Image: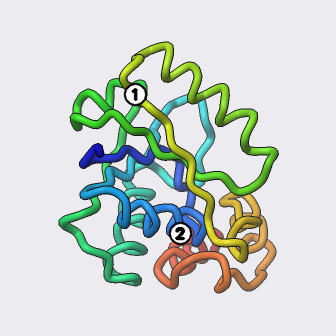
Amino acid sequence: MSKVVIYPGTFDPITFGHIDVIKKSLKLFEKIVVAVSDVENKKYLFSSYERIDIVKKALFKDLKLDKKKIKVISFSSLTTDLCKKYKSNIILRGLRAVSDFEYEFQLAGMNRKLNKSIETIFLMSDVENQIISSKFVKEIVKLNGDIKKFTTKSTIKSLKQKYE
């Protein structure tokens, strides 16, 4: 079993769906590297620095998860290069719905072509969190809706500050 797993994503912002995947992976791996993507071809609400701060507050301040088991970093490289850097042969991806699978399947195949020793595993968030997406959370908060069921207190605070 690999001791370290890489969980790449935009986390713009982190949601309870992401957090479910993180919590489940902690039962399977010794350490998880939450890798916040900083690829320039995407338009983010929060900068990578802000997203890292939001993720850390959500995981360590709000939820009190173990800092020794989770590392939060920014990256703008190939995920396979990140695996090499952190000596991991496992990429973790979260699935919400069947519609996610086709894209994730293609991504896993490309990563496998780039490095044959890397496997991608998929974890699903709990049923009540499968419909949550960062995109919807941003839309709801922008329209002054209640997002308490979708993300942590500190993340809600960051979102509200962004839209003030």
The image quarter in which residue 151 lies: bottom right
The disc labelled 1 sits on which kind of residue?
Ile
Q: Is residue 109 visible?
A: yes
Quadrant of the snapshot with the C terminus: bottom right
Name of the residue lying farthest toward the front: 1
Where residue 128 appears, as percent x and y from the top left, is 72, 77
The residue at which mark 1 appears reads as 118
Q: Nearer the viewer, residue 72 or 116?
A: 116
Closer to the camera, 123 or 22? 123
Answer yes or no: is residue 71 visible: no
For mark 1, give the secondary structure.
loop
Q: Where is mark 2, residue-wise?
A: 20
Mark found first going from the N terminus, 1 or 2: 2
Callout 1 touching callout 2 (CB < 8 Å): no
Which percent across, then down, holds residue 160?
60, 77
Seen as rendered, the residue at the extreme left is: 68
Amino acid type of the residue that numbered disc 2 sits on in the rendered structure: Asp
